[in-house]
Image (spheres, rainbow, N blue to C red):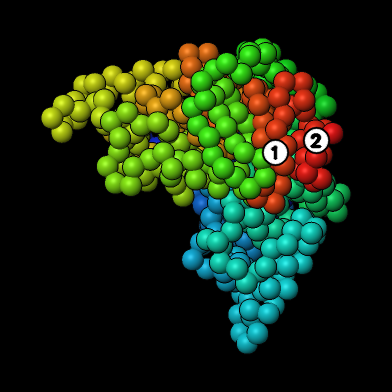
Amino acid sequence: MDEVLKAVIAVDGAKVSFGAVKALDGVTLRVMPGECVGLVGHNGAGKSTIVSVINGGLTPHEGSVASDGERLERYGINAARARGVRCVFQELSLCPNLSIVENARIMHRHLGGLGWRRRAAEIIEKSLDAVFPGHGIDSSRAVGDLSIAERQMVEISMAFSDAGIAPRLVILDEPTSSLDASLARQMLYHVRRFIAAGGSVIFISHILHEILETSDRIVVMKDGRVVAERPADGFDHHGLVEAMGTVAKEETRQRPGREHSTAPLILSHQTKGLPFAARKGEIIGLAGLAGHGQTELLLALHAAQSGNWLPARNPLVTFVAGDRRLNGVFELWSILRNFSIASLGDLSRRGLIVANEEEMKGADWKRRIEIRTPDMAANRILSLSGGNQQKVLFARALSTRAPIVLMDDPMRGVDVGTKQEVYAIIRDEAARGRTFIWYSTEMDEVSLCDRVYVFREGRITAELAGDAVNEKNIIAASFQGLAA
């Protein structure tokens, strides 16, 4: 009982259902002052739903929410903000047509009157400086002009900003998914400072070493329930994966060395710095600090090999977007239509889609990549968790006949079990002759590549292969333009 009185937020017996789907099935969760609670589980485990309950965006059908020992009967987003509850969503929520300062005004609704722009700029710039020293982001810029990493930096800084109501509980949902290692370290350092000063954090991430290193207590969810909860030092990586319900697999840190010098050249592109080239059956990594030209190269390769209007019957390239809301999903369409849109040439006869073939192909990939939905045709894409939406984008790309797959940091928000399945599919497809060009901010993923191009300030500064693909060389090339 004393714990309930002290808890910043205490959720007891929360149940939430969407039709026949039990999103939460009696979840109890408490967050204490000065504590970081790591929240883990596979896509669709209920993490986003419990976050919505804590954030005031969703009222549980059963159960209660309390704060500082007071049961909250009428608890919504405004009440949560008034109590210092902030949330950084996996799907970034800033308004792209507004400036950073104007978005800060939306976050801090009481920040009005004459001179509000100046005060808002001071608040967000102070927070950006605290969380990401040396960020170089101008607060007058439109959010839509920022890179996805910069948008994530702004949204995180916004959550920690203080305009009169200090943040007490900050919920971070996959906060480092678009950040490179250097920016992630800055953010995690700030989280630890915030907790040491008495703040509370709920930290959701599929990057398990971040959870283990940052959390005081870890809560594991599966199928809408809490299935494990104990201090972070009571878990290791293997035990955490097992608690999530997945048999831990040994990752292949480096692909077996295959000689690609004799494989036919399938794609080349002239860039600033070193030239780019890809051969049949290669997995090529694009590395370096976020926002230094990797995505721009992928977009240039896609534009150069794609038609301006009608899709090619036998496309050369297909694309897996990292920012799924911006250029990945069709939000009003069903899951099945989002999946099949890239394969219409194979699924149609005389201009009409053969529904049976579309459904069979969708069912096959639903099984292969474990898309968690009872009905792909009836349910809209936004009915899925963010990670499951990303699975649909993977399936859409891999189900085409395109020999080259372009991937823009595609593992954002994808659980560890699915990552292993996708890695296996990528290796299998590469062995069959398919080429992958893969931008990633995660070293584990870069280490799966045959060759890696490192970017710095829009230029390719180094080409690494085999044993030379390691964090030391990539960091050296990222900052100095030289491989160590």
**Residue placed at 49% from the left, 27% from the top?**
266
Q: Secondary structure at mark 2?
A: loop
**Residue placed at 80% from the left, 40% from the top?**
482
The amino acid beneath tag 1 is Val
Q: Which residue is mark 1?
A: 454
The amino acid beneath tag 2 is Ala
Mark sitting earlier along the chain (1/2): 1
Q: Is residue 226 visible?
A: no
Residue reaching furthest to the bottom? 114
Residue 363 is drawn in which quadrant? top left
Number of the label disc, if any, that sits on residue 483: 2
Q: How packed is label 1: few (under 14 Cα within 10 Å), some, or many (20 or more)?
A: many
**Residue placed at 64% from the left, 55% from the top?**
150
- State the image coordinates of residue 448 (x, y, percent, origin top left): 65, 22
- State the image coordinates of residue 110 (x, y, percent, origin top left): 61, 74
**Residue placed at 43% from the left, 25% from the top?**
403
Number of the label disc, if any, that sits on residue 83: none
